[in-house]
Image (tube, helix red, strand yellow):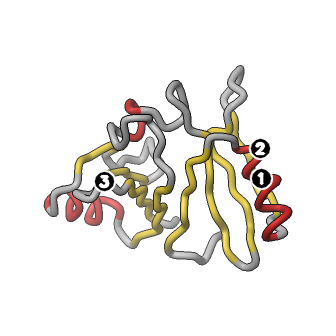
């Protein structure tokens, strides 16, 4: 299991080119690539750069982080970076975020794997999950 507490989550316009770039520049190693059946876009991927892990996915107007998933964060639908954080208690963290002015994108539940999502008042997208 990953030991990082916070993981940058890049939303890119071309995941395949992003992989090639990070391999050439940072000697990145692809760990995982997820795609939905019948869709070419990368829905979730993980790479190791040095001793750190980054997450990334394709984003587009029709795509993997459009308004129905990531909210209305930008006019063009692009969310350049998100943060994915392992927390002690996802429900408490989520409730604290909402109380502090965040907008809910996904409530925590067993169905989501003890994961929740919200947009803070500064338009940053946060995914929080309790480690198991």
Residue 40 placement: quadrant: top right
- Which sits in the foreground, 38 or 82? 82
Q: Earlier in the sequence, mark 2 or mark 3?
A: 2
Q: Earlier in the sequence, mark 1 or mark 3?
A: 1
Density class for disc 3 (Cα within 10 Å; few <14, some 14-19, many ≥20) is: some
Question: Which residue lies under the disc numbered 3?
Answer: 123
- Which sits in the foreground, 76 or 114? 76
Q: Classify 23 as above or below 15.
A: below
Q: Position of residue 80 (x, y in %)?
A: 50, 51
**Residue sitting at 44 percent across and 60 percent down?**
129
Circle 3 SS class: loop
| Pointer 2 with pointer 1, Cβ within 8 A | yes
**Residue sitting at 42 percent across and 56 percent down?**
127
Question: Which residue lies under the disc numbered 2?
Answer: 16
Q: Classify 132 as above or below 33.
A: below
Q: Is residue 56 left or right of residue 116?
A: right
Circle 1 SS class: helix
Circle 2 SS class: helix
Q: Position of residue 33 (x, y in %)?
A: 74, 46
Question: Which residue lies under the disc numbered 1?
Answer: 19
Look at the image and tell me in which quarter the N terminus lies.
bottom right
């Amino acid at each position: 299991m990953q030991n990082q507490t916070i993981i940058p989550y890049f939303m890119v316009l071309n995941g395949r080119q992003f992989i090639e770039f990070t391999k050439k520049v940072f000697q990145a190693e692809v760990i995982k690539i997820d795609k939905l059946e019948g869709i070419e876009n990368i829905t979730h991927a993980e790479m190791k750069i040095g001793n750190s892990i980054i997450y990334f996915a394709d984003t587009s107007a029709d795509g993997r982080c459009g308004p129905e998933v990531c909210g209305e964060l930008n006019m063009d639908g692009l969310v350049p970076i998100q943060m994915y954080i392992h927390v002690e208690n996802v429900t408490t963290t989520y409730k604290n975020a909402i109380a502090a002015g965040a907008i809910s994108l996904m409530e925590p539940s067993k169905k989501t794997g003890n994961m929740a999502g919200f947009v803070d008042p500064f338009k940053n997208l946060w995914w929080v999950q309790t480690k198991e």
